[in-house]
Amino acid sequence: MNYIEVWIEIKPFSEDYAEQVIAQIEELPFESFMIEEPFLKAYIPEDSFSSQDLKTLLSAFRHNSEFSVSAQSHFVKEENWNALWESNFSPIVVEKLCTVKADFHKNLPRTKYNITIMPKMAFGTGHHQTTYLMMDAILEENLKGLKVLDVGCGTGILSILAAKMGAEPQIHAIDIDHLAVDSTNENIYKNKVSKKVTCLLGDASVIQAARYNLVLANINKNIIISDIETYSRALTSAGRLFLCGFYTEDIPAILEEGAKYGLELVSLKSRDNWAVLKLKKSI
C-alpha cells in the first residue's frame, strides 16, 4: 500500500500543541502519528488522503494566538515503507540491563532482558528519552509478585519488561488506540509473555480501584493531570505510580495535582529535558 506522509510544522513547538493538532485531524483516516520536533508527522493511505479535508480541519488554528501550523505532504511508495520505518527505529539499550530491538537489528550485545518488537509507525519509533526513562525506573525496582498496570501501552514494551522481571500475572495493558492494542498483542506473543499480559482497548475509565501495586503511565501532561485521580484510586495502599511523557517544567503542575489524591514524590530523573516521576500513595 502506498502512503502519504504529512509533515505539520508547529510554531512554537510543544508536545501539548501537537496533541491538540492530532485531536483536530484524527477524524481523517490517519493510521499513525509521530512527533519529531518541530513536526507532527501523520501517515495515511494514499487513496484515503484529501488535501482539502486536511486544510479545512487545520484552518481551525488560523486565528489561534498560542501557535500556528503549516502542512506539506510527501508520497511514500509501498516498497520504501519498511525502509522508512526501519530508519526511524533505533535499538534502545538501558543501563546495560535491557535491550529493545526489532528483528532487523543484528549483532547487538546481549543484556539481562531482551525485548524484540515490531515497530508499528507511531508506537516505539520516537521519544526514546521517555521510553528509556520509564524502563530505567522499572529496572531499579523489584517487580516480583507485583500487580502492574501499563496505561498507554503503545508497543507494550513496559508490560513486556514487567513480565520478564517477574511481575504477577495478569499484567494489564491499556490503550485508546486499537492499533496500539494490536501492536502490543503481537509483541507480547513474540516475546513469549502472552500468558502474563492482557491488553485492553480503553481509557482510564476501565481501570479498577485498589487493584495494582504499580501503575505505569508514559503519556502526555494533560492526560496525566486529567486522569491522575483515577491512577491513585487504582493503587493499593502504599502503591506506586511512575509517570513520564512530559517535560521537566511540567513537574510542579503534576505534583500539585497528585498531592490532592495522596500521591507523594519519591524520586525524579530527567533526560534531555524529559522527566520521570516516582510517586507513592500515602493514603
Image (tube, helix red, strand yellow):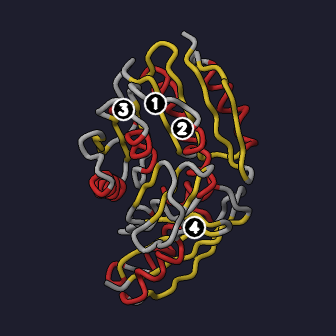
Residue 118: % across, % down = 38, 65
Tag 3 or tag 4, which sits nearer the N-term?
4
Left or right, residue 281 beside residue 277 = left
> Which of disc 1 and disc 4 is earlier in sequence?
4
Q: Quadrant of the N terminus?
A: bottom left
How far is disc 4 from disc 1 in space, using C-alphas?
A: 35 Å
* Contact flag, marks 2 and 1 (Cβ < 8 Å): yes
Task: Confirm or deny contact between disc 4 and disc 2 (CB under 8 A).
Answer: no
Mark 3 surroundings within 10 Å by alpha-carbon count, few (fewer than 14), some (14 through 19), many (20 or more): few
Residue 149 is drawn in which quadrant? top left
Which dot, 3 or 2, sits closer to the camera?
A: 2
Helix, strand or loop under label 4: strand
Task: Judge by depth and name the residue closer to the eye, 149 or 18.
Answer: 149
> Residue under circle 3?
205
Residue 102 is situated, as x and y percent measured from the top left of the image, at: 43, 67
Instruction: Judge left or right: residue 67 versus residue 228.
Output: right
| Among numbered discs 4 and 2, the one appearing first in the sequence | 4
Circle nearer the viewer, 4 or 2: 2
Secondary structure of residue under mark 1: loop
Q: Nearer the viewer, mark 1 or mark 3?
A: 1
**Which SS class for mark 2?**
helix
Residue 181 at least partly seen:
yes
Disc with the residue nearer the chain's start (2 vs 1): 2
The residue indicated by pointer 1 is: 143
